[in-house]
Amino acid sequence: MARSPRPQGPTRLVFSGSVVPADSFREDVIAGLSLPQKALPPKYFYDANGSRLFEAICRLKEYYPTRSELALTRRHIGAIARFARKGCTLIEYGSGESLKSRLLIEALRPAAYVPVDISQEALRGAAAKLRRRFPWLLIQAVHGDFSQPLKIPMARTKGRRVVYFPGSTIGNLTPDEAQAFLRMTRGQVGPKGAMLVGVDLKKDANVLHAAYNDAKGVTAAFNMNLLARINRELRGDFDSRRFRHYAFYNATLGRIEMHLVSLVPQAASIGNHRFSFDAGESIHTENSYKYSIDGFRTLAGIAGFRGEKVWLDPKGLFSLHGLVAA
Ligand code: SAH
Ligand code: AVI
């Protein structure tokens, strides 16, 4: 790929101070394991190891979303850039390794790129690579949690604000949470702003099943890593050999559910808190909602956006929605 010229002065990379509360992990884990259906928020998958495992998932043959979204972005990059407009400020939530963002940055030449992620490791790794690849780019990285109201420190730039939310990370929110998130971003981009959202589509349940139950067991390791993180960071004593990964498509609710299922009756402790499990009882660790194009547009409409464009990959597995403030 051709190297970009360097018209805008010296390299600029800024890390804003963390806006992730320090003890929320312990509180959320104890609260989640105290529910009748034990549950943990999926945002805690992404410690350093979890972020690496997710990157490995993205490269699996069964995990079609990343390949499909990359293909559709490459194929329609001209139209996507016309929609978002050159020189905009590009804010990306859940930026991870910023893989797809590179295509957008090249085409849009944004005034600033603001990646926001809960994983410090992913954020730092991605920012360092972007800095080498786009020396002209102003990068303002934010270690933040988008499930909380989030004020993002941002330089004053002239172009419109565009929020980019790829990867179908929006599918990991319940529809109510997704609406609240879209309302927050609608406020952030203002009346002239726009949003690009990657959304996984409803499809044959067998394809979905394979994507979340890969043959190499990488998704299983990603799921099980939550227990290892609890043991390490909260001094828990979960025996991971006594749990197994379980993922299935819940057609009624239109979502993949991931669980960690206890293989035997057992108990595990975190400090003074003790949690018992029946054999077969699960911890619900993630939902991944799948939408129809109209279903997602309706949801975005309630949050104050109008669906103006939608792009699909050649196999029609994944969608990228271009939303404008309604
Ligand atoms: N956008 C990338 C990565 C998707 S994985 C892609 O399309 O491939 C989901 C990303 O969102 C991870 O990098 C994870 O660390 C981040 N993430 C998950 N929950 C988050 C939250 N509540 N706040 C901020 N980042 C979050
Ligand atoms: C980040 N997110 C959209 C992924 C998904 O497909 O729901 C996380 C994931 N979970 C298991 N595999 C991938």
Image (cartoon, rainbow, N blue to C red):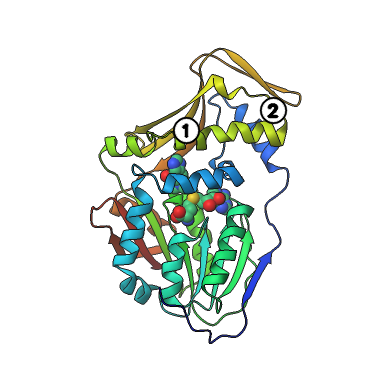
Is 308 rendered above or below residue 18? below
* Circle 2: residue type: Gly
Residue 1 as seen in the image, left or right of residue 130: left
What quarter of the picture does the C terminus occupy? bottom left
Point out which mark residue 236 bears.
Answer: 2
Whichever of labels 2 and 1 marks the residue nearer the N terminus, that label is 1
Is 153 rendered above or below residue 21? below
Q: Is residue 174 visible?
A: no
Please tell me whether mark 1 sits on a helix, a strand or a loop.
Answer: helix
Please tell me whether mark 2 sits on a helix, a strand or a loop.
Answer: loop
Q: Quadrant of residue 72?
A: bottom left
Q: Residues within 10 Å of mark 1 (few under 14, many from 20)?
A: many
Q: CA distance from mark 2 to mark 1?
A: 20 Å
* Circle 1: residue type: Ala
Name the foreground residue: 134 vs 321: 134
Q: Which residue appears at 69% of the width and 34% of the height? A: 232
Residue holding disc 1:
220
Q: Which residue appears at 33% of the width and 33% of the height? A: 252
